[in-house]
Image (tube, coloured by chain):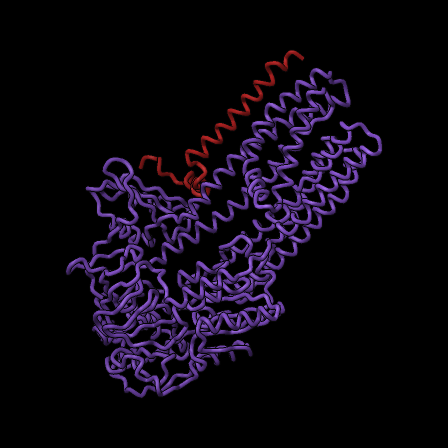
Amino acid sequence: MNVLIYLLPMALGLGLAGLFGFLWALKSGQYNDVEGAALRVLSDDDLPK
Amino acid sequence: MSAVTEAIDLSLYAKPESAGTLGMDVAVEGISCGACIARIEGAVKSLPGVTEARVNYTNRRLHVAWSEALTEPSRIFQTLADNGYRGHPFVALRAEQEEAAEARRLTRCLAVAGFAAMNIMLLSVSVWSGNVTDITPETRDFFHWASALIALPAAAYAGRPFFSSAWAALRAGTLNMNVPISLGVILALAMSVVETANHAEHAYYDSAIMLLFFLLVGRTLDHAMRRRTRAVAGNLAALRAETAHRFAGDELVNVPAAALKAGDRVLVRPGERVPADGEVIGGNSEIDDSLITGETARRNVAAGAVVYAGSLNYSGALTMRVTAAGGSSLLDDIERLLEKAASAKSRTRRLADRASAIYAPVVHATAALTFVGWWLYGAPLHDAIITAIAVLIITCPCALALAIPAVQVVASGALFKRGVILNSGDAIERLAEADTVIFDKTGTLTLPEPRVVNAAGIGPALAQLAARLALSSRHPLAIALARETTSRAPFDGAVEEPGQGVRVMIDGVEARLGSAAFCSVLPHTPLIPAQAGIQNHESRADNVQLWTPAFAGVSGDNAVSYIHFTHAGQHATFAIAQRLRSDAIETVQALRDLGLDLHILSGDRESAVQPVAEALGIAQWQGGLKPADKIAVIETLKAQGCRVLMIGDGLNDAPSLAAAHVSLSPISAADVTQAQADAVFLGERLAPVYDAVAIARRARRLMLQNLWLAALYNLIAVPVAIAGLVTPLIAALAMSGSSMLVTVNALRAAQKSRIIGTGEPS
């Protein structure tokens, strides 16, 4: 069971990384326009004309 | 009238962003698909000096930034208009900003609770399966301490919305749903820590955190729904906001009405609304006060007359001096009545508060009795306390706390889809209780703007020509006629003769639209019979002078105005009057079928109210009422035990809306009136009124059902807990099961209701 000593902190660390990733995304306004983001991906404005 | 472009003063809206650039939010009307995003952003960005343009599709808003020196901000609006969108500068109201901040706080709490719940459940499942197999006590203790490490900080962070509300309630000497929630969470965590230190088999970290997670999901959804409706309401308010032409020396500057100050001189052109309360200092005109008093007959004004914000200027340009700033200034007596009505309004207790007032004492008493019972029975003190706390945990009102918000979220979403925007959180419950409906007439039962009422009697081709020509005029009658055409392209070269009409050459033949004299029509035009359901039956000679003969002749009836059209020897006379909303008759009948008692209380003349009441079959009606009279009628009804739903749009209705049990107003209502209403409905149809009542009633039924489901859950779970048989696994299953049950039941609030009428969707 010694394996738990480092597996558990690793699992928690990964979970925390996900949590902070979400909080960062929230803070940087990425959830301000969820409907728009779904539509923007369809526009080809990044293609050279 | 004149095509002179005026400078627009945007100083109220534009805010400095980075060095030398200004930024502004614009509410945009007409964003309907994904392609609009690219079109708007592309067009606005191509303006010189614009550094940023980003559309928020969810809110239908555009954020622009431009360098101060390089671009004229009014060009942004021109560009939007050229692309077919209407934009208006937008400043978020404080309420909306606060709500956005609160929503972000809740989402952060939800994220933390979700993270903690997942990780703790991972550990708990290991412990549960280990307990029935071969877990060593050391490993179990390690897992429990790891759970405590996650749970304690997470609960301290994610539980704050509940703890602070419970603390506030306790300090005020009351109980709300957050008190048992907070107590349950804190006791569960404290007991778990003590049990872990004693190497016990069971710990309840997962129950406490899962409870917080479920409750936060409910609250976050509730908030998201409210924010969405608030954003739409904010946009509509911005788009409705009037601009005013203010004199700056001899020049005119276009400013938002909100920027007007007392003492400003303002020009009000025909066809425009008066931007603020004030006194006329020059010009003669007629003013339509129907948004203020409900009176449909127009009033002559000249220098010295007092005019109110929201009145429509009909025939001549007026110069006025603003006496009270902003669009929301009021007649004194309306303000006084409003204060009185708002303070006298008995705060109805919400269903959730009533439920928790019964629930919390019962639960706490049960827990106490459990402790006393086991202790007297001879159980060790430790076991008695653990069992009592288990009762508190299992009864922690997860389902009960979700029972009402879940229904509210679904119901307000369903209302939103049908064009009803809720202003207050408990409006649904109060709407469901209404048993009497009081309608205002002007602008509520009838359309807010006058319409052509005799279109059936005129050839469609001729009517289309006339309506298209009407696009070139700003006169209110022409604007009413122009609503009949589907074309948005005015004729080239149309010339407006001020005070007479417009003329244009169509296929080499002159067409004229305007007064009888201008169109060479005999003054005694035969009356064209109107359609059914129209109020123009009266013919009162004493009001003849109320309409300018100069533009469109009068036929002895001020409720109906006439505009004439002539082209290539063909004549048409359009009768323009207040018209009932297209589905008013069906909606009123449907409301009656719901068992509601219907009344009409109008500020308009009795002779104008009667035909409407007759068309709708409403026997209880009164006309010529002052705001105080309307309140008196509501008070009488209230004294008889009626729960009154008041529906009105005029400024004169604002006090009655505040006095009624619950209130609705159309989106065209005066600002002050809308602020009083519990909900606002959009569009030209009356059906949202029926939808609001029907959905609210079903929502209330489901709320009660959910409360009973939660009670039933407790009835089963509490004896198990009292018997001391609850393990963390049972607690987790019971809590999540009951929460799912009430949530799924709540989804039924969105079911389709009966659709009334076949009018265009609003």
Up-down relation of residue B168 to residue B620 (above or below): above
Q: Is residue B728 left or right of residue B158?
A: right
Query: Is B142 or B755 nearer to us in this picture?
Result: B142
Q: Position of residue B758 (x, y in %)?
A: 52, 66
Q: Is residue B564 left or right of residue B418?
A: left
Examine the image and state in which quarter residue B132 appears.
top right
The residue lying at 15 percent from left, 60 percent from top is B250
Q: Position of residue B135 (x, y in %)?
A: 73, 18
Query: Is B62 or B171 nearer to us in this picture?
Result: B171
Question: Does residue B707 appear anywhere in the picture?
Answer: yes
Q: Is residue B360 left or right of residue B696?
A: right
Q: Provide the letter of the chain coloured purple.
A: B
Examine the image and state in which quarter residue B501 appears.
bottom left
Q: Colour of chain A?
A: red
Q: Quadrant of the N terminus of chain B?
A: bottom left
The residue lying at 48 percent from left, 31 percent from top is A23
Query: Is B552 or A42 nearer to us in this picture?
Result: B552
Q: Position of residue B421 (x, y in %)?
A: 49, 56
Q: Position of residue B15 (x, y in %)?
A: 29, 43
The residue lying at 45 percent from left, 67 percent from top is B653
Query: Is B220 or B456 nearer to us in this picture?
Result: B220
Question: Does residue B473 appear anywhere in the picture?
Answer: no
